[in-house]
Every structure is written in C-alpha cells, then in structure tokens.
Amino acid sequence: MSGRPNKDREIPVRIIYRKKGHGHGHHGGAWKVAFADFMTAMFAMFLVLWLVNQSSDVKAAVAGYFQDPLGRADEFGSSIVPGEGAQAQVARPLDMRDVVDLSKDRMQTMAQRLMSAVEDVPALDGLEQYVSVKLTDEGLEIQLLEDSLGVFFNSGSPDPSLRGRQILALIGRELGALPNPIRVQGYTDARPYTGRAGYGNWELSADRANAARRILTRNGIDDAQVIEIRGHADRDLHEPSDPFAASNRRITITVLFTPEDLAQAARSDSARAHPDSAAAPPARDRAREPATVVAEADHE
C-alpha cells in the first residue's frame, strides 16, 4: 500500500475571489422629509415678513382670499364641501365702510410719508412747525402756516417764496401717487390789504391758492384732480381769538375722499342704524331718481 492511503478521498479546496463594489449603501428617505419641512417653514416665514410690510388693502385682500378662496361663501359658507351640516365661519365681504376705513389708513400712511419727506430735505429744515397734516372727515388736510416774516409767501405777495415753491413741489410729488380729488384754499388774516387799489384780501387769498395749484400740477398732480380753488380772505381764521395772528395766513391742500366712498359710507351707516328698513327700490325705479351732484370743478 502506498504511504498515503486516503489521498484518493481528499476533496480539493477551491478558493473563489469576488470583487466587491464600491457603491454607497441605502440611506433611507428621512432626510427628504426633514428638508421639505425646512423649506416649508422658510417659505412661511418669508410670506409673513412680506405681509407685515404690506398696506392694509393688500392684507385685507389676502385675508379675504383665505376666508373664501372660491368666492362662493354666500352659497355654501366657508366650507369646501357643499351641502347640509355645520358650516365654518362665513367669509364677510368688505362693505363700503371698510373701504372708507382702508382709504383713511392709506391717507394716514401718506401723511407720515409727507412729514418724513419734509424732514429729509435740508433746505426745508425747521419748517416742520409750519406744516400741519391731519385727517378730517373730508380727507387729508395739509396746511402751510405763515409766521410774521412770511415762510411760504412773501408778505403781501401772491407769489410763493423759494421755500414755498420747494415744499409745494414736494407735496405735489408725494400726492401724485393718489388718484383722489384735491381742493386748494387760500386764507389771509384780518389786516386789510393796501398794496394796490381794487385788490384786497379776497383777491390775494385766491391768487395764492391758484399759485399753489400751478406748482402742484407741475410736480405730479394731474390737473383734472384739482376740483376746486377757493379764496376765503379772513372769513375762516385759524386763530379766531387773534384775527391778526400770522398763522391765519395759510394755504390748505385737502386730499378728498372720493364721492363714491362717502356716499356708500353714508348708505352703510343708514342701513346699520335702520336694519329693518325696506330694501332698495328696483333698478327701473332708481333710474328715475334724480342724480346727486357731489363735486364740481372750477375751470379756468
């Protein structure tokens, strides 16, 4: 026998070498969800920052869309599923009183911009005390008040001074962004004007208002927006207790609410005060009602 009796029974050993790939393993999709949440949060933040800096008109429009995106709240309420059942809060459309409030808010913003613009002009430094800007029932009222030396108009002259022309041009540029009608009025104190024969405080106040109008329309205000020029002389004093006070000499520029806004607001107030009153007459009856003149232009 051979010295290796089990040699024929040995099983050969085969070594197999397999090359492993270098691809990345599967990481799952959790990071995609987290990234999507992050992007949604960033979008929401920038949307809020954008809304904060918008006017009240834009905010009201955005709020109205989210309350009633389909514009059918009157039919189905604010629920997106029509039919019976409890409905969510019904979107309330803006009535005309809300529109007037938004107009007031816009004018209040314009008043702040105007005063900031006056303060930013070095040539008008120190004139803030002679400029009065306030909101009235008629609209935004801007008054240019004189002192004893004459700030905006030279004493006894219908021609504006250099500072008067500068501030009227600035007002024209600022108010040119609004479509509202504008009224310009001139006033004097009770001291009789003796500059020349046949020319008194009536003529002086009217000529100053007209001079202001010309500068305003050359600097941004459309000529059609000016619906009235008035000269009051000394009939409406700023300081009734002191008829000769310098501040009685002034120019008033009033940015008026539109006649439609005021008429609709009056009807809205009347409807709220008398909710049980009869409905408006049919269109054929209203057509026979006389029109109401709410403003008239003074053409030269």
Image (cartoon, grey):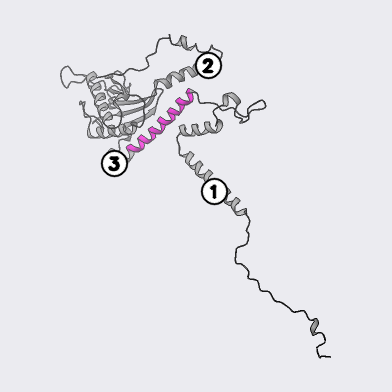
Residue 147 in view here: no
> What is the total number of numbered labels drawn onto the structure image?
3
Relative to 42, 150 lies left or right? left
Residue 297 appearing in the image: yes
Report the magenta stretch's main SS.
helix
Image coordinates of residue 124 in percent, x first then y, are 28, 38
As measured in the structure, the alpha-carbon distance from the residue carrying label 3 to the one carrying label 2 is: 51 Å
Residue nearest the viewer, comparing 150 with 35: 35
Give the mark, 3 or 2, whose residue is nearer the N terminus.
3
Badge 1: few (under 14), some or many (20 or more) residues near its Cα, within 10 Å? few
Q: From what the image shows, is residue 77 above or below residue 3?
A: above
State which quadrant residue 203 falls in. Answer: top left
Which residue in the rendered view is the most extreme toward the right?
A: 1
**Quick one: label 2 or label 1, which is nearer the N terminus?**
1
User: What is the magenta range?
Assistant: 96-118
Secondary element under disc 3, as helix, strand or loop, is: helix
The residue pinned by badge 2 equals 273
Q: Mark on residue 122?
A: 3
The residue at 77%/79% (across/down) is: 11
- Report helix, strand or loop for mark 1: helix
> What mark, if any, has residue 240 been given in the picture?
none
Which numbered disc, 1 or 3, marks the residue closer to the eye?
1
Q: Quadrant of residue 240?
A: top left
Around disc 2, counting alpha carbons within 10 Å, would you say few (fewer than 14), some (14 to 19), or many (20 or more)?
few
User: Circle 1 sits on which residue?
Assistant: 39
Vertical relation: 235 (above or below) 57: above
- Of residues 28 and 128, the one nearer the viewer is 28
Disc 1 or 3, which lies upstream in sequence? 1
Gap between marks 2 and 1 measured at Cα: 50 Å
- Quarter of the picture holding the C terminus: top left
